[in-house]
Every structure is written in C-alpha cells, then in structure tokens.
Amino acid sequence: MSDLFRYDNPVWKFMGRIADLFLLTLLWTLFSLPVVTIGASSSALYYVTLKMAENHDDSIVMAYVKAFRDNFTFSLPVWLILLSVGGILGADYAVLIRAGSPEAKVFFWILLLPALLYLLMLTLIFPLEARLDTDRRHLFAMAFMVGVKNISWVFFMLVITLCVTALGVFVFWPLLLIGTGLTAYLHSQILVRAVFPRYGWNEPEP
C-alpha cells in the first residue's frame, strides 16, 4: 500500500505526464490566439516536448516562455509563409471541389503532391526549428530533405495527428484538453528515437 504514494509510482508518473500535456496544450492555445504567433508557439511547444522525450525535463512554463520569446522573430516569417501556402492550396481545393467537372478532378489529383509536400513541411519544420540553429532557407531545405528521407515516419506522425484530432472531436472530447501537447509529445518520441539519431541531432545526456 505504501508503494502507492511513492513519487516514482507508475500511476503518479502517468498522471504527472497527463498534467504536463494539459499545461502544454493550454500554453500553446493561449500563445497562439493572435494567430500570427502560432509559429513561435509551435516551436516552443516542440522545444519542451523534445526535451521531455529525452528525459531532460525542466520547468514547463519557464522553458516554454523562454523558447517562445527567443524564437518569435525567427518563427514569424516561417509561419506566414506556411500560412500563405496553405491558404492558396486550401482555396484551390475549394474551387476544384465546387467545380465538380472532369477537368477539376484532374487538377485535384495534380495538386495532391504539392499538398502532401506541404503537410510534410508543416509537420517537421517547427520541431526542426526548435532543435537546430540555422537560417530560414536551410530550415526549409532540411525539413524537405528529412521528410523525404523519412517519409514513412512522417506519414506515421500525420496519422497520429489525424487520430488524436478525430478521437477528440468524435469520440472522447476531453482528449482535446491534452490533444496538442499529446500530439507534439508523440511526434517528439518518434523524432528522438527514429529520426534525429540518423543526423546526430539528439541532445547529450545531462
């Protein structure tokens, strides 16, 4: 019975992790409210979850706020580029779906590759920004390169995003309270264990 109250009890560790993911989701939501800050907010989110995946846990709030502040200027143009491209692709697909003509169906499939490449970049660019010290041009290039070379893992990350979102919306809405943090944490686990070691991007043990 005494083991139940030990700080290293698996139950308490699990509950502590759930609390961490809730806090991260709350922070990401609050810091993303102006919309233009979503890039810096996402970069800060992955800065924390990558450290969590490597068992380098720090104060979540302090680490998040510091990463947000440090990366805001760098992240803003990156996010605006992604937002603009996503808006163009979304508008194109909306027009094609409404058209419903045979020609529109052809263009629908032609645009599929750019859309997939966009999702690939969107999935990887903020964790890479959180981990690497580089300029924007090389950041986009590395996100593309890493995504193409690790396409199966990136696809798995996209499936995780879709599943967490769908489960939260259609099955168990409380999951949305930790959804953003949980998605980033699972992505970080994949990156730390399967992707980053190939390039020597994991942080050394403290």
Image (spheres, helix red, strand yellow):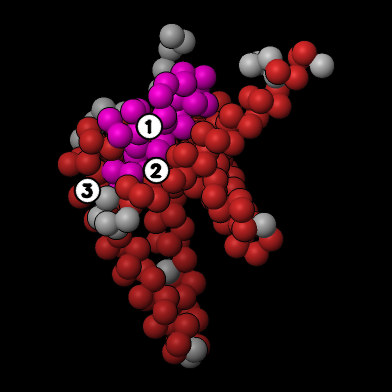
Placement of 37 over or under 58, stated as above or below: below
In the rendered image, residue 134, in percent from the top left (x then y), is placed at 24, 31
Q: Earlier in the sequence, mark 3 or mark 2?
A: 2
Dominant secondary structure (helix, strand or loop) of the stretch shown in magenta = helix
Identify the disc placed on residue 27: 2
Q: Label 2 amino acid?
A: Leu
**Of discs 3 and 1, which sits in the foreground?**
1
Disc 3 to disc 1, how far (Cα)? 21 Å
- Residue visible at 33% across and 44% down? 41
In the rendered image, residue 99, in percent from the top left (x then y), is placed at 44, 89
Magenta-span inclusion, residue 162: no
Q: Residues within 10 Å of mark 2 (few under 14, many from 20)?
A: many
Query: Hey, which quadrant is residue 5 in on the image?
Result: top right
Disc 3 to disc 2, how far (Cα)? 18 Å
Residue at the limit of the structure toward the right, as seen here = 1
Q: Which residues are magenta?
A: 39-66
Residue where numbered disc 3 is placed: 76
Q: Label 3 amino acid?
A: Leu
Q: Residues within 10 Å of mark 3 (few under 14, many from 20)?
A: some
Q: Label 1 amino acid?
A: Val
Query: Hey, which quadrant is residue 125 in on the image?
Result: top left
- Residue visible at 52% across and 26% down? 53
Q: Secondary structure at mark 2?
A: helix
